[in-house]
Image (spheres, grey):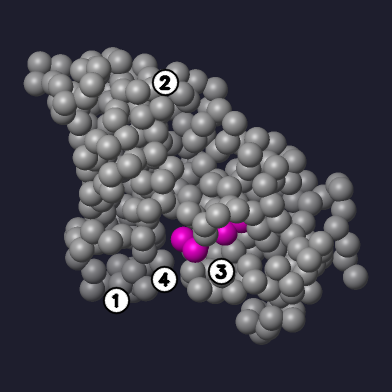
Amino acid sequence: MTTKTTETKTVFIDGEAGTTGLEIRERLADARDISVRSIDPEKRKDAAARAHLMREVDLVVLCLPDDAAKEAVALADQLGSQAPKIIDASTAHRVAPGWTYGFAELEANQAQAIAKAHRVANPGCYPTGAIALIRPLIDAGMLPADYPITVNAVSGYSGGGKSMIEAYEVKKTAPSFELYGLGLEHKHVPELQKYARLTQRPIFVPSVGNFRQGMLVSVPLHLDTLPTSPSLTDIEETLARHYARSQLVSVVRDASTSLKGRISAEDLNSTDTMQLAVFGHPGHRQSVLVARLDNLGKGASGAAVQNIRLMLGLGA
């Protein structure tokens, strides 16, 4: 029987055959301080076999649909003191009591909170970008919590899971571009609102394009409607201060000039980083804040690996 050790930490990815699970496994392949344990494919849905493996490892990552993730947590609960730490990559526990939100750059002590947590909800890809842009401005008093925020975003089709990937890559039936979630009930909205500290529900309009991965999240602002009537530089400096110590989140300086008013969704693919940019026209007093990230990187698997290392005491 394999036992938990204090040297090489052990991780079980429950749902490792999915897109997120495969990406996490790939990122951990060369980690000398982490060993990934797998279950026999024929026993993937065998509760006893999964519970046995959960009991042996230090941490379990749930890459499952929401209902299956809830069932997995209930299974772990039955293990009592032998239960492993859990990271849930589904939507099931992102606003649930008792779960720590896994966006390490959220605020100054968030990484420490993740490191001490027994259960962490991995952030959604869209909320990661939106929260990164909005939360520092609210914390700084620059943006009112009840401001009528609109978030527009586009993602590569890999964010839609197996069926969407198949529609684009195999069946070739998917459109080149489409808006969706226009009933304004997207499952990421509660998470976005809670951790951005918005008191008014934001309008969130997601879209998908005919490219595998990459993401842009944008937030338009009328600067003269804000209490402090900030400049583009004020917003940029506020974001830069918030992420000054981050190795993964950075602010593009003078984006309107340095990026020439353009930004591509795919430039950070296969990385775990995120870039924030403040575009706008000072004369018109209008701005568009943009977050660029890989929806499979900082938007999913990259964030999960960052949280795995924090929770196992291995550093981010």
**From the viewer's perspective, is the residue at label 2 or at label 3 nearer?**
3
Q: Read off the residue under disc 4.
A: 162
Q: Quadrant of the N terminus?
A: bottom right
Q: Earlier in the sequence, mark 4 or mark 1?
A: 4
Q: Read off the residue under disc 3.
A: 69
- Secondary element under disc 3, as helix, strand or loop, is helix
**From the viewer's perspective, is the residue at label 3 or at label 1 nearer?**
3
Please give the label number shown on residue 171.
1
Answer yes or no: do the residues labelled 4 and 1 have beta carbons within 8 Å?
no
Q: Earlier in the sequence, mark 1 or mark 2?
A: 1
Answer yes or no: do the residues labelled 4 and 3 have beta carbons within 8 Å?
no
Residue 145's spot in the image, x, y percent?
32, 35
The image quarter containing residue 241 is top left
Tag 2: Cα neighbours inside 10 Å, few (<14), some, or many (≥20)? Answer: many
Answer yes or no: do the residues labelled 1 and 2 have beta carbons within 8 Å?
no
Q: Read off the residue under disc 2.
A: 240
Residue type of the residue flagged with mark 3: Ala
Query: Does the magenta segment cover residue 90?
Result: yes
* Relative to 74, residue 139 above or below: above
**From the viewer's perspective, is the residue at label 1 or at label 2 nearer?**
2
Gap between marks 4 and 3, in whole Å?
Answer: 17 Å
Q: Earlier in the sequence, mark 4 or mark 3?
A: 3
Q: Earlier in the sequence, mark 2 or mark 3?
A: 3
- Secondary element under disc 4, as helix, strand or loop, is helix
Q: Earlier in the sequence, mark 3 or mark 1?
A: 3
Magenta extent? 87-92
* Relative to 78, residue 205 above or below: above
Residue type of the residue flagged with mark 2: Ala
Q: Main structural element of the magenta stretch: helix, strand or loop?
A: loop
Query: Does the magenta segment cover residue 65?
Result: no
- Secondary element under disc 1, as helix, strand or loop, is loop
